[in-house]
Amino acid sequence: MRHKGLQRAGDEFDVRLGTASVPDLLDIRQEGGIIVIMPKTLPELDVTRPICCRPLGAEAMDQDTALEVALRLKALADPVRVRLLSMLLTAPDGEACNCDLAPAVGLSDATVSHHLKSLREAGLVVGERRGMWVYYRPVREALTALRGVLDPTC
């Protein structure tokens, strides 16, 4: 049985959604008698500086700009990371230690460190080592810039 929009072309599948080609976004291969479909990883870019582009509604984005926005949104596409960012934004001193964040979200220090690293690599938080611990604070300019990109009325 064929899936609508999925056409077999030799040993390859041609999948199209509108004008976008799904093979550009997915790694589709056959292993034995099973078709394996996995999302392709996004390329590594320096996204530590705030995004600087026109809002989504201003004009069609070029591929590079869309990728920069997507990498930042990917870092936020996890409920734990959204909670951590919310905790940092509402922290009384404007920063919080990993040692305090881990118990607050009910995860290990290592897991929280992994999530904070993703946020840091996306330029949404910065960390400062103090002894054994790292204190994190949000990069408000980066969040404001991202909000501006997503606001269709700007």
Image (cartoon, rainbow, N blue to C red):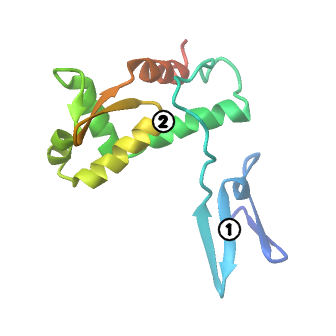
Which numbered disc, 1 or 2, marks the residue closer to the eye? 2
Residue 27, position in %: x, y?
66, 64
* Marked residue nearer the N-terminal end (1 or 2): 1
Q: Nearer the viewer, residue 58 or 44?
A: 44
Residue to which mark 1 is pinned? 28
Q: Amino acid at mark 1?
A: Ile
* Residue located at (55% from left, 22% from top): 149
Residue 15 vs residue 53: left or right? right
- What whole-number distance in Å separates the C-alpha atoms at marks 1 and 2? 27 Å
* Residue located at (28% from left, 48% from top): 112
Residue to which mark 2 is pinned? 122
Residue 146, position in %: x, y?
49, 24
Q: Nearer the viewer, residue 97 or 59?
A: 97
* Residue located at (30% from left, 45% from top): 80
Residue 141 vs residue 14: left or right? left
Residue 134, position in %: x, y?
27, 37
Furthest residue toward top: 154
Check the picture and name the quadrant holding the C terminus.
top right
Q: Secondary structure at mark 1?
A: strand
